[in-house]
Each structure stands twice: as C-alpha cells, then as structure tokens.
Image (cartoon, grey):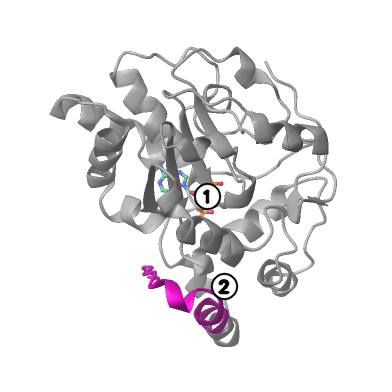
Amino acid sequence: TPTYETPGHDHKYKNFNFALGRTTPEHIDSLESFEVKDSDAFLVTYPKSGTIWTQQIIISIYEQDGHPNECSTNIERMPWLEYETAEYTLLSSPRLFSSHLPEYLMPPAVKEKKSKVVYVMRNPKDNIVSYYHFTKGHKNTETPKSFEQFFEWYMTGRVTASSWFDHIRGWYSGRDQYNILILTYEDMIMDLKGVVKKLCSFLGKNLTEAAIDQVVEKSKFDTMKNNPKANYQHFPPEWFNGKFLRKGQIGDWKNTLTVAQSERVDRVFQEKLGDLSLKFIWE
Ligand code: A3P
C-alpha cells in the first residue's frame, strides 16, 4: 500500500505548480529521459476534469480485454507520472499512467507517437466549482476563505497545476505531436457509451457489446461511488477530507458563480483560447 505524504502549499518548478510533498525537482527532471513503451497509455487532465472517471473507464476496458486490475485501488493501477510514488516502476505492461502535467513537461519520448495519450477537458466554470470544493477538503493546502477568493486564485493560476487556460492551450495546440484522443467531460456525461466505444477504438481494444456495457456500468457515478477501488475514499482524512465523486453534473456552476464571474471567465476564455475554435458545453 502506498503512503501519501502530506502536501503543503503548492510549489513552483519549471513554471508549473506541483503539490508540495508529492514530488521533487529531481523526479520532474528525470521525466525528460523517461523510457516509454509502445504499450503505455497516459491519461492527462487538468485537475477536476474527470480524471478518476476516465481512469475507471480505461482500467475497465483493459480488464475486459484480459488485463485484470489486481491493485487495491485505481491510483495504484494508474499512478501519477509526476508524483514520486515510484509504484509505476513495478507496473507490468500494459502500463497505464495518469498525469496533470502540462504539455511542455511531458516525457519527450511520448511524442514518438507509439504510446497513447488521452486528454480530457471540462468546461472551466464547472471545473472551478469542482476545484473549489476539492481544495476545501484538502487539509494542508491553504483553505480558501470564500468561493470569491478561490475564483481569484484559479483565474490567476495560483492553484495546483497552474492555469486551466494555459493547460488547455498547451495540450490543444500541441496535439498534433501526439497519438492523442481528446475528450470532454461533457461528452462523457451526455453519451458515456459513445465515449467508451471511442476509447476502445483508440486503445485498440475490440470488445463485445456486452463487455462495453459492463465498462459503462462500472463507470457510472453511483457504481463508482460505492466501489472502494474507484472512489478515492482511501485517502487518509488528515490528507483529504472531501468527496472525489461530489455531484457529477454539467452546469452546477450556475449555483455558485455570479454573473460578473461568469462573464469574466467568458472574457478570459476568449482572450486566451479564442483562436483555437474550442467548443464546450456549458449547461
Ligand atoms: P464535481 O465536483 O463537479 O462533482 P477529477 O477526477 O479530475 O478530480 O474530477 C472530479 C470530478 O469528476 C467531480 O466533479 C466528480 O464528481 C466527477 N466524476 C467522477 N466520476 C464521475 C462519474 N462516474 N460520472 C460523472 N462525474 C464523475
């Protein structure tokens, strides 16, 4: 069983905010020469975009394809590349990784396009609200005094994983360098089965209709909530005292953001990403 160090405040390295206590500059540097296997798959997200959901889908697809998940939790089956947990050195192939790394810090070997990258993004208004609740549950990072304060941190990139806008820009504009499938959280909400099929075909897994239905069933909000392998309730409460599976909806931001905040997101979205013809579903 891995142990989790208590994270402190974020620390910046190579212009990116990492959770302090969970990695080191040496580890991040070592990723430059990280050896990639053709069978590796990387799930990359900005935090609170549907990471653990997509993990569960991918792990379930591999299970149906004859690679049982013998780890006690999904985080061990699909560990974070940038955290110095080292479990992944023990992973047998096919190796599955999760990551919040920005495009420019990804191991360069991934660009050889043999290994696969799945990038999941979520509309920033729901992302902010989800991240706010998550941060409140974090015991050793600074607790925001109000949503307003957290909103300010988020908009200025003063959170773990830095700016959402930069993360999206880096990955989206750099996508052609990778063998990559880009998905949105909203697609997953609206057509989970369709997304599972897309993932199967991207990952080269030819599953029967019944196997696909099983993956869908295992990845539903309520199923995951009750599955200790998938629900992330295993984090010790002194590290995290909240819920990874909180609401699982599109449009919850309307209950939290003011009109002015919503308009500010629209404005910054237009300024920073307006040229990329990205389309999000907001409600
Ligand atoms: P909310 O806080 O809006 O509920 P991450 O895994 O990147 O930390 O993202 C967490 C968000 O994904 C949470 O959003 C969580 O509820 C949502 N999520 C996780 N599993 C889900 C599922 N099976 N269906 C819908 N949403 C899910």
Number of the label disc, if any, that sits on residue 256:
2
Residue type at mark 1: give it: Arg
Q: In which quarter of the image is the C terminus?
A: bottom left
Left or right: 253 in relation to 210 = right
Decide which of 205, 27 is in the foreground and name it.
27
Q: Residues within 10 Å of mark 1 (few under 14, many from 20)?
A: few
The residue under label 1 is: 246
The image shows residue 160 at horizontal and vertical percentages of 71, 53
Left or right: 39 in relation to 234 = left
Q: Give the range drawn in magenta.
A: 265-283
Residue type at mark 2: give it: Thr
Tell me where residue 115 sits by quadrant: top left
Decide which of 230, 118 is in the foreground and name it.
118
> In this rendering, is residue 124 above or below 51?
below
Q: In which quarter of the image is the N terminus?
A: top right
Mark 1 lies within 8 Å of ligand 1 (Cβ measured): yes
> In this rendering, is residue 19 above or below 158?
above
**Farthest front residue in view:** 112
